[in-house]
Structures are given as C-alpha cells and as structure tokens.
Image (tube, grey):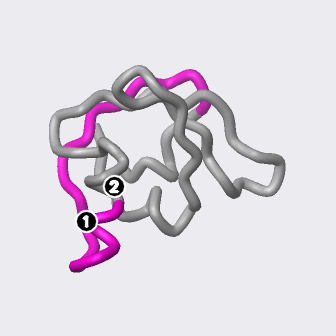
Amino acid sequence: MKTLKQAKVGETVKVVKLHGEGAIKRRIMDMGITKGVEIYIRKVAPLGDPIEVTVRNYELSLRKADAEMIEVE
C-alpha cells in the first residue's frame, strides 16, 4: 500500500482508496479527491508539510496527516 505522502515530487498518481472516518473523509472528498482521480505532486515544503498537488486542474495544499489517508498507485 502506497500513500500520497510517500509519492515523490513530479509524480502523477491515481487514487485507489480513501481511509479515514466521517468528517475527515468527507473533507478530503469535498476537495475533489475521490477514487480514480489523478493527482500530480507539484512540491513538498522543506519540512515535508504541506504537500502541494494539482488535482482536477487546480492547486491544493494538503497536510501530511491528510496525505497519509489517501491510498494511491
């Protein structure tokens, strides 16, 4: 199992599954991250938090904790 947190800068990954419960999972889905969507990793902050990604043609910053809940391939 590979998570979004483990993806490298410049990589394009596809969402396989969202982990997490209730409001947290709902918030991730509201940001446009759903099963099957492709995510491009733009850059990672010097200390690793946050991660800047492009999803559905817009830029988004995710915390490491949120990125760990997104399983990708």
Residue under pointer 2: 70
Compared to residue 40, the image places residue 69 above or below, namely: below
Q: CA distance from mark 1 to mark 2?
A: 12 Å
Compared to residue 5, the image places residue 39 above or below, namely: above
Image quarter where the C terminus lies is top left
Residue under pointer 1: 26
Mark 2: which amino acid?
Answer: Ile
Are dots 1 and 2 in contact, CB under 8 Å?
no
For the magenta stretch, what is the residue range?
9-27
The residue under the point 24% across, 32% down is 37
Does 13 appear in magenta? yes
The residue lying furthest to the right in this view is: 46
The answer to whether residue 1 is seen in the rendering is no
Pinpoint residue 20: horizontal percent, then vertical percent. Answer: 28, 74
Left of 53 or right of it: where is 22? Answer: left
- Give neighbour class at mark 2: few <14, some 14-19, many 20+ (Cα, 10 Å): many
Mark 1: which amino acid?
Answer: Arg
The answer to whether residue 44 is seen in the rendering is yes
The circle drawn on residue 60 is none
The residue under the point 34% across, 57% down is 28
The residue lying furthest to the bottom in this view is: 22
Compared to residue 69, the image places residue 2 above or below, namely: above
